[in-house]
Image (cartoon, rainbow, N blue to C red):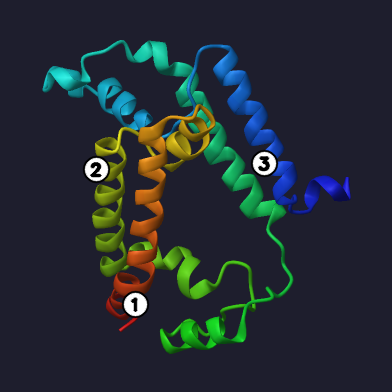
Amino acid sequence: MDFILQPWSWYVAGFFIALVTFLLFYFGKHLGVSSNLETVCSLMGARKISDYFKFDWKSKKWNMVFVLGLIVGGFISSQWLTPSEKMNLNPKTVEELKAYGITDAGEKFLPEALFAVENLFDVKVILVLIVGGFLVGFGARYAGGCTSGHGIVGMSNFEIPSLIAVIGFFIGGIFITWLVWPYIFKFLLG
């Protein structure tokens, strides 16, 4: 039982991701999360407003169950599988985070300064979440899929557009992390 309640190694999780991807491929489905936004919009009535959302959303019910599983799995892992011991962070990273006002970095797996429920009621946090959510959603649809769709399924199918998208995701991530994220931190915590 202790094995189940401990965080799993990357190779165990990776095996299960590959297994799910193979099973979906075998049954003619494709793993991806961002397309579910279209399904939800169609389900909620957007098909009455735009032809883009006019499709049979019922044919995508399996994918909605997949996303529900992601949400439930995330809840289970945050409640019962998150390590309680101190994280072994690089001291330089801890110092940099302290400069942004995150004083408990490395003390807990999910620092309260970042992951406290109270943060969801801060106008600045809500603004960053809305803008960030829009940019991620727009970018995923513009790229024809999200990181899981391109990085797991597209790359395993040797699709050149997925390779280009994944390279773009990494370049964008590096750019945001080093050049934009410090200003977002200062905005949120300043």
Q: Which residue has dot 3 on it?
A: 14
- The disc placed on residue 138 is 2
Q: Earlier in the sequence, mark 3 or mark 1?
A: 3
In this view, 118 is above or below 89: above
- Measured in 3D between alpha carbons, the distance from the residue under mark 3 to the one under mark 1, in whole angstroms, is 31 Å
State the image coordinates of residue 22 (x, y, percent, origin top left).
62, 23
- Measured in 3D between alpha carbons, the distance from the residue under mark 2 to the one under mark 1, in whole angstroms, is 23 Å
For the image, the number of numbered tags is 3
Numbered disc 2: secondary structure? helix
To which quarter of the image does residue 121 belong? bottom left
Q: Amino acid at mark 3?
A: Gly
Task: For the C terminus, give its image quadrant.
Answer: bottom left
Task: For the N terminus, give its image quadrant.
Answer: top right
State the image coordinates of residue 71 (x, y, percent, origin top left).
52, 40
Q: Amino acid at mark 2?
A: Phe
Q: Residue at x 54, y 81 (%)?
A: 93
Q: Callout 2 environment at 10 Å: few (<14), some (14 to 19), or many (20+)?
A: some
To which quarter of the image does residue 187 belong? bottom left
Numbered disc 3: secondary structure? helix
- Measured in 3D between alpha carbons, the distance from the residue under mark 3 to the one under mark 2, in whole angstroms, is 28 Å
Q: Callout 3 environment at 10 Å: few (<14), some (14 to 19), or many (20+)?
A: few
